[in-house]
Image: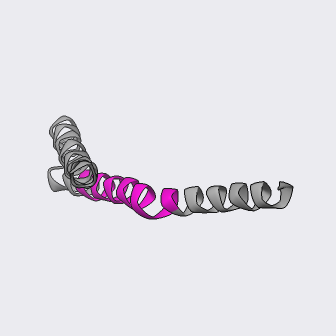
Amino acid sequence: MSEVSRHLGFGLTWALSTLLFLWLGTVVDGWLATRPLFTLVGAFVGAGAGFYSMYFHLVIAPRRRARGEGAEMRSRGAGE
């Protein structure tokens, strides 16, 4: 169950970052009267940032942990 909640959190992070940047783009568009420009830019930036965060936590971080644990295991085995 903890794995499900962890993965659900990554998906929510992606969705919320997209919505936050979409909203910020809408606000900037209201200030500058450039109606869909910053809304679209905000949506893409938010989606990209959320996707990178999810990719980092699901792909890159486990690889780094596996490399670190593997090196630790090799150093323990060599000392015994």
Q: Main secondary structure of the magenta part?
A: helix
Residue 29 vs residue 16, the one in the foreground:
16
- The segment highlighted magenta reads 42-62
Quadrant (top left, top right, bottom left, bottom right) of the C terminus: bottom right
Q: In this view, does 24 lie to the left or right of 76?
A: left
Residue at position x 45%, y 57% from top? Answer: 56
Residue at position x 54%, y 64% from top? Answer: 63
Q: Is residue 2 left or right of residue 64?
A: left
- Residue 45 lies in the magenta-colored region: yes
Residue at position x 49%, y 59% from top? Answer: 62
Residue 6 vs residue 12, the one in the foreground:
6
- Residue 65 lies in the magenta-colored region: no
Q: Which residue lies furthest to the right in this view?
A: 79
Residue 77's spot in the image, x, y percent?
77, 60
Residue 51 vs residue 22, the one in the foreground:
51
Residue 37's spot in the image, x, y percent?
22, 55
Residue 36's spot in the image, x, y percent?
16, 55
Q: Quadrant of residue 16?
A: top left
